[in-house]
Amino acid sequence: MALDLGIRRVTAESYLKLFLYGPEGVGKTTLAVASNDHDRMGPCLVLNCEGGVVAVAGRGDVDEIPIRTSEQLDNVVAALYQRDPQVAKYKTVVIDGVSTMA
């Protein structure tokens, strides 16, 4: 008897949740904001907790919100969940440097 692995086709309604971990400078942010290069994934919003977006500033198509406090991060996340008009257009959200909030 074959084991059902639950494999399914990814559709436009599917969501991808991804956690990128690695040392500084390996390209995590660059990979994440490459979502702007795909119709179904862009535009991308970076919640910039530590200034790591300098590496992608040259793209010219990366939006960011500088995050300095955990309260500010909470407020932005709440706005995202509520589909606030200021952030409703973003299909990809990157929290860059979340370890600095710990």
Image (cartoon, rainbow, N blue to C red):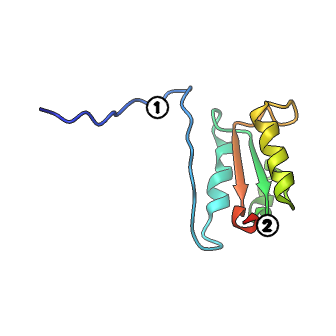
Image quarter of residue 66: bottom right
Q: Is residue 90 above or below residue 62?
A: above
Q: Which residue occupies 46% across, 31% down? A: 10
Nearer the viewer's eye, disc 2 or disc 1? Answer: 2
Badge 1 density bin: few <14, some 14–19, many ≥20, Cα 10 Å? few
Q: Is residue 65 at least partly visible in the picture?
A: no
| Secondary structure state at the residue bearing disc 1 | loop
In the image, taking residue 20 as reference, residue 85 lies left or right, namely: right
Which quadrant of the rendered structure holds the N terminus?
top left
Q: Between 34 and 73, which is closer to the camera in this rendering?
A: 73
Residue under numbered circle 1: 10
Image quarter of residue 52: bottom right
Sequence-earlier tag: 2 or 1: 1
Q: Which residue occupies 84% across, 57% down? A: 67
Image quarter of residue 39: top right
Amino acid bearing label 1: Val
| Secondary structure state at the residue bearing disc 2 | loop
Amino acid bearing label 2: Glu
> In this view, which residue lies farthest toward the left?
1
Residue contact between numbered discs 2 and 1, judged by CB atoms under 8 Å: no
Q: Which residue occupies 74% across, 39% down? A: 43
Q: Between 92 and 78, which is closer to the camera in this rendering?
A: 78
Residue under numbered circle 2: 50
Q: Position of residue 6 (x, y in %)?
A: 33, 33
Q: Between 77 and 20, which is closer to the camera in this rendering?
A: 77
Real-space CA distance between mark 2 and mark 1, rounded to the nearest whole angstrom: 33 Å
Q: Position of residue 8 (x, y in %)?
A: 38, 30
Q: Is residue 56 at least partly visible in the picture?
A: yes
Q: Which residue occupies 79% across, 66% down? A: 50
Q: Is residue 99 above or below residue 89?
A: below
Q: Between 101 and 88, which is closer to the camera in this rendering?
A: 101
Q: Position of residue 62 (x, y in %)?
A: 79, 50
